[in-house]
Structure formats: structure tokens, C-alpha cells
Amino acid sequence: MGKGTAHGKKVFLVQRAFADLEGDSHGPTAIAKQTDLDAATVYRILQDGLADGTFVQEAGGRYRLGPGAFRLSMQALSQTPDPEATQAVLDKLQRMTGGLVAYYAVVGARRICTDYAIGDFDPRSIGIDPFELVKYSRSLRTGASGRVILAHMPPPIQEKVLAESVPEGVGPGVIRDNEALIESLKDIRAMGFAIGRQECMAGWDSVAVPVMWGDTIHGSLLLWVHVDKMPEDPSQLVAATMTAAEMLSRLASMPWAPESVA
């Protein structure tokens, strides 16, 4: 693992610790214990993140996530050697399948759409504002993309998400029973993908595959297909989505942090 990649993963672990620990603000010692990093490294990461708003310092030497935390979670993909590489992967999957493609990044215990490829489809035709799509975070308990991420989150995060109520406005296929949801997470970890049957929106099925940063979940790649065009055997769509997600995982593993940051 390169120096930049190693540092980037440490930064990502510090961010994840805020979601894993109880409460909103924490000190370097608690974060170090959660991440298995030494306290000096954690302190340096927290201090470095103050300037761009990734972290906010509070009284008593404690810190909380700031508005820049979302940008931090996306750096591994957005700052690859080829800045257009991620979008190219999404565009290729969209052309191959004819569906709608979206990438969801992990932000704490939620997900947010950071990029998409929809060809010439007008999302407003189904009541979706493209700006709204990338503006708001969404629960991990709904939709194939959410479940794929949740399947790779630590138990404390899973318990937190399972305690949430099912959001309003979801599709008729959403999994409401927690036991059934937990079983689906086991299947996802075993198979490496999830298939959603009108979970997020009525009339749309989906295929979702995790995007990993080493052994850490970074996000999920989602392919939406209208129910009328979803084949009885979706194996080809699954294979195409898994191939694209593997490419994104490779991009996420590339060095991106400045060499001057240790």
C-alpha cells in the first residue's frame, strides 16, 4: 500500500469512528481506541481537517464531524489520477445496460448519491429532481444500494439503522421486517450483490454492488431498471454491475493523498 493510500485510509477510519461511537463529539483518545490508531496520529488528522471543515473542534479538546466530512468521504474516488475515470465507469455501465446508474457514498450511517449516469432519460418524468437526488442523504435500511452498504457496516451501525423507521415515500417492495432485512444482509455478504424489487420507487427494480476501499465499505453502485425491462434472469445485469463496481474499488485503492501528508 502506498504512502498516500495508507494515510487516506487512516483519515477515512477517523471519520467512520464518529459514526461508530455513541454521541456526536469525541476526543483523540476515544477515536484512537476505536480505530486502533495511535492518539498522536488521530490528533494530527483531526487538526489537519479543521481548515476545510472536515472536523470542528469543541470545548474540552473534543471534535465533531463538520460540513466538509462528505468531501472527505469522496476523495478516494474523486481525486484518482484520472478525475474522469469514475464517471467513465458509470457511463459505460449505463450504455451497456440501458438502465439508470448511480453511485452512493457512505456518510456516517447514511448514504448520499454523488454521481449518476442516466443517458438521455429525464428524471423529472418520474418526479425526481436531479439536484435533489445528490443533495440529501438517505437511510441505509431502504433500497438495494442501502442494504449493500449496511451489510458491510459494523454491528453498532447496523443496530442504529435497524432502529430507524422506514422512510415515507418508498416503493411497495421495501423490506419492513427487521428479521427479513438482517437475513438479506447475510445473503448480500455471501453473494456480493443485492437485487431490489421496487424497494425505493414503484415501477423500478435494481441491482446494487458494494464498492470497497480495501476491507472498508466506501459506497455502492446502483443500477435501476424499469420493471417492464427487468429480465427474469438478471445475471447479465448483475455481472455488468459487479464488473463496474470492481473497477471503482480499484480506483478507490489508488493513492490520492498528497505525499507531504504523513
Image (cartoon, grey):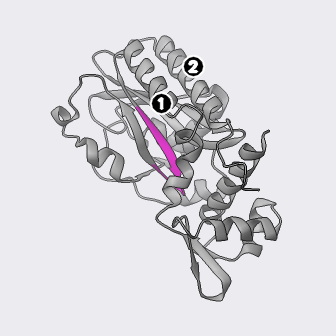
Above or below residue 183? Residue 117 is above
Residue found at x 72% / y 46%? 4
Q: Is residue 239 left or right of residue 38?
A: left
Identify the residue shown where x is 72% and y is 38%.
Answer: 214
CA gap, disc 1 and disc 2 = 18 Å
Residue extending furthest toward the front: 260
- Front residue of 210/5: it is 5
Q: Is residue 142 visible?
A: no
Image spot of residue 118 (x, y percent): 31, 27
- Residue 243, label in figure: 2
Frontmost residue, 48 versus 27 = 48
**Side (left or right) of 257 relative to 200:** right
Does the magenta-highlighted stretch encompass residue 45? no
Q: Is residue 107 above or below residue 170?
A: below
Residue 107 magenta: yes
Quadrant where the C terminus sits is bottom right
Question: Residue at horizontal 61%, vertical 75%?
Answer: 63
Residue at figure coordinates x 58%, y 36% from the top left: 80
Q: In which quarter of the image is residue 39?
A: bottom right
Part of the protein shown in magenta: 102-111
Q: How many marks?
A: 2
- Closer to the camera in the image, 40 or 166: 40
Disc 2 element: helix
Quadrant where the N terminus sits is top right
Residue 41 picture location, percent across and down:
78, 65
Give the number of the disc on residue 84. 1
